[in-house]
Image (cartoon, rainbow, N blue to C red):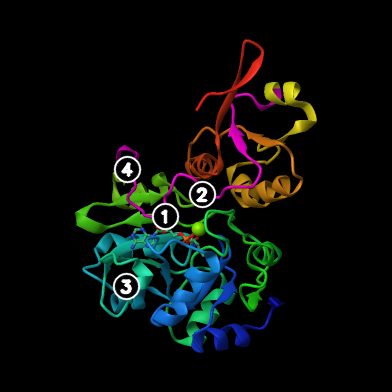
Amino acid sequence: MTKIIIDIDTAVREITEGNIVALPTETVYGLGANALNENAVVKIFEAKQRPVFNPLIVHVHDTDEFEKYGKDIPDEVYKLAEKFSPGPITYIVKKKRIIPDIVTSGNDSVGLRIPSHEMFREVIKLSGVPVSAPSANRSGKISPTTAADVLKELDGKIDFILDGGKCKIGIESTVVSFLENEISILRHGYITREDIEKVTGKINIIKNGKIISPGQMKIHYAPFTPLYITEDADEIKNVLKERAAVLDLKKFADKREIALNLFSELRHLDEMKFEMIIAEKTDGEGIGAAINDRLERASSGKIKIINSKIRITE
Ligand code: TXA
Ligand code: MG
């Protein structure tokens, strides 16, 4: 039986005893374990059915800890951290040996993040260990943004979910690599390219669509109902009528609000069991890059109307 709890002490006890526990962050809920305890970290991979080649982010309490787990950390990391951490950004740097290989999937690098959710920070502080935590969904599925959504994903697979309310951001952290003297965004997130470039000057984005971040697999965040991207959702809806649900992003005031609600809306429509879900992308500016990235990874392809018939074009 999985229990939703609100007392931090139980979560701390679970971490220190080498168990896994779902924890709230400002981005999405994470499934945490002591990052220095291999046996504990294995439990994360098992509960999520996560492929072992996909490395985990290590969450720490403040920048003083970066040097304990990372090495040759460039100044830019600290400059960015001054502005954006605690917060939704993960720094990929060379790793020290104290971090077990299972955490980084054998890579020579480690992702470090200081989450801003106070409950998560308390858990790190009180347990006295770094906490590795991927999003608390089954591998490839939609990231949970409430304790109730974690329960839907992992009921029976974990003992406790620490309830810290609805996540304030709603999409995962921006993942930025500092390896090989280059700064590259490996995963778009709430902190945008423009935000980062104001601090560091020009940076790279995932090059030529090449997968650099192992977790950036094409299908991710997949609902059970196939999702298709279209240029004109109303036009498609007119043809498909009640067979299709529209993921209507226009009803939100701005992109922050879209990010905040994207995964919960998608989950909600998925539960309604339509034949398909259709969605239009955003203009891709600012946080729009992260939103479009999640939509593309959730989708089974693109559709449009050709000669008054609906066609899947990709
Ligand atoms: O907002 C977030 O980042 C959430 C919360 C829980 O902190 N966590 C999260 O973790 O989204 P996960 O495991 O779902 O995604 C982590 C991403 C994956 O794409 C993974 O491949 C990448 O970060 N990553 C982690 N360590 C890496 C490394 N050493 N090198 C390259 N990519 C790495
Ligand atoms: Mg994830």
Residue at 65% of width from left, 38% of height from top?
A: 249
Q: CA distance from mark 2 to mark 3?
A: 24 Å
Q: Amino acid at mark 2?
A: His
Q: CA distance from mark 2 to mark 4?
A: 16 Å
- Earlier in the chain: of badge 2 and badge 4, it is 4
Q: Main secondary structure of the magenta part?
A: loop
Q: Are marks 2 and 1 in contact (CB under 8 Å)?
A: yes
- Earlier in the chain: of badge 2 and badge 1, it is 1
Q: CA distance from mark 2 to mark 1?
A: 9 Å
Label 3, residues with CA under 10 Å away: few <14, some 14-19, many ≥20: some
Q: Residue furthest right?
A: 242
Residue at 36% of width from left, 49% of height from top?
A: 185
Q: Amino acid at mark 1?
A: Gly
Q: CA distance from mark 4 to mark 3?
A: 23 Å
Residue 222 among those drawn in magenta: yes
Q: CA distance from mark 4 to mark 1?
A: 12 Å
- Disc on res. 215: 1
Q: Secondary structure at mark 2?
A: loop
Asked if ligand 1 lies within 8 A of label 1, the reply is yes
Residue 263 appears at what percent x and percent y? 62, 51
Residue 269 appears at what percent x and percent y? 72, 45
Compared with residue 177, is residue 73 higher up or lower down, i.e. above or below? below
